[in-house]
Image: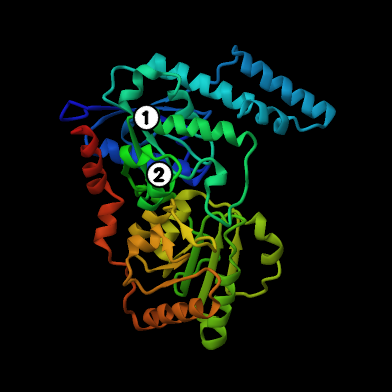
Amino acid sequence: MKNNTVKSVLILSESIDVNDSSGSKANVALINNIYKLGYKVKVLHYSRKEIRLDNNIECVNIKETKFFINYLLSRTQRVISRVLKVDMSNFLENIFGHSFTFFNDTKSISKALKEHYNSEDLIITLSKGASFRPHYAMLKLPKLQNKWLAYVHDPYPFHYYPRPYNWVEKGYKFKEAFFREVSEKAKYSAFPSLLLKEWMGSYYPNFLNTGVIIPHQNIESNKLADINLPNHFNATKFSLLHAGNLMKQRSPKGLIEGYLKFLENNKEANNTSQLLLIGPNSYHKEYLSTIKNDTIYIDGYVDFEIINELQKKVSVNIILESKSEISPFLPGKFPHCVSADKPILLLGPHYSETKRLLGNQYKFVSEADNVELIAQHIETLYLNWLKGENQKLNRKDLEDYVDVQFLDKQLKTIIND
């Protein structure tokens, strides 16, 4: 990009609804911080509802187009599946690679982009989950690809996830080809972690040439005056919080058994500590239903603003990753945990982006199933709490990394290209 400054950025985001997923929270945080750096920002989003962001950032809610053939096909498929009680998606996606709904959504997005593009200097595509609809839409607009930065938040397709993830999607060959085209057509790519860039670059080598690291950003809530924390949170106690989705591969068993072991070794902590597990947990419901302990509180979905404030009030924030050889992901809550400035208990593999960022000298790290070590770490954190010592994360370097300082530096590598 020849210009020394990018004065305008068009962001194509699948969603900016912070309560629908961790991906959307990350999208909004990135949008807000780009705006803070002084860029003129316009957001086209497919959230399916009107949403206003802070600072009066211009937001356009993309409407689903209902006169494309894919819209009619998707509705016909739904009716046939409902009436005949037959799931046609396996058959159809193995033929076409994606659902008719996906194709209609991406055409709606590309249509909106053509209508609203106003010679912006940079176009950033943001997604959530395993969708990447904005990225697919950009492939239909070759004239804009020399301004395109494709943000890749997770491995894609699913079979490129590291073990224990082992799901092969319908139409996976089409999805491989789709993302190979993204890697080759987007002038720039960005990843939330160095390990993810290297991981995806092993499958799509051009990402190693085009990729920069833009970590998940910290997001600030503007609703603090209205927040009521959960009744089961006791601010006078030593409290450990895991906030987030307990996916199938993220078993809380090692954490819970480690905490119970800590209680066994520190009897008085039964009256002065609590473990909070907040977030979707359907994959582990059967196991969690067997936990009968008054110091362990298990809750489902809670609004982001409440979680964000709770992370600042607890004694320790927990990041739980899968039992694996490597975790190339940067958890979406990592910047919020850094901003909360409370010790982090990391339960994850040796090769982990979070561990890489915390550094080899950081003490409170364990494999997710190492019950003895988890209990030891909790005891050390508890004793520090009793003595009023080392109760802050105190990592200004990480605060800068997930805030505008590092983002500014990374965007300038593109601006000055």
Q: Amino acid at mark 2?
A: Gly
Residue lying farthest top?
Answer: 67
From the top left corner, tell me how far across and down residue 284 is, in percent. Answer: 66, 60
Q: CA distance from mark 2 to mark 1?
A: 14 Å
Q: Are marks 2 and 1 in contact (CB under 8 Å)?
A: no
Q: Quadrant of residue 316?
A: bottom left
Is residue 368 or residue 41 the one in the foreground? Answer: 368
Q: Is residue 237 visible?
A: yes
Instruction: Find residue 303 and report its horizontal and vertical position in percent.
Output: 51, 49
- Where is residue 82? Give x, y as percent: 79, 29
- Total numbered labels: 2
Question: Where is mark 2, residue-wise?
Answer: 201
Residue in front for this viewpoint, 171 or 373: 171
Q: Identify which residue is drawn at 59% across, 55% down.
A: 247
Q: Residues within 10 Å of mark 1 (few under 14, many from 20)?
A: many
Q: Is residue 271 left or right of residue 73?
A: left
Ranked by sequence position, the earlier of labels 2 and 1 is: 1
Query: Quadrant of the image for the N terminus?
Result: top left
The amino acid pointed to by label 1 is Ala
Is any part of residue 61 visible from this angle? no
Give the residue at mark 1. Answer: 186
* Tag shown at residue 323: none
* x, y percent for residue 315: 41, 70
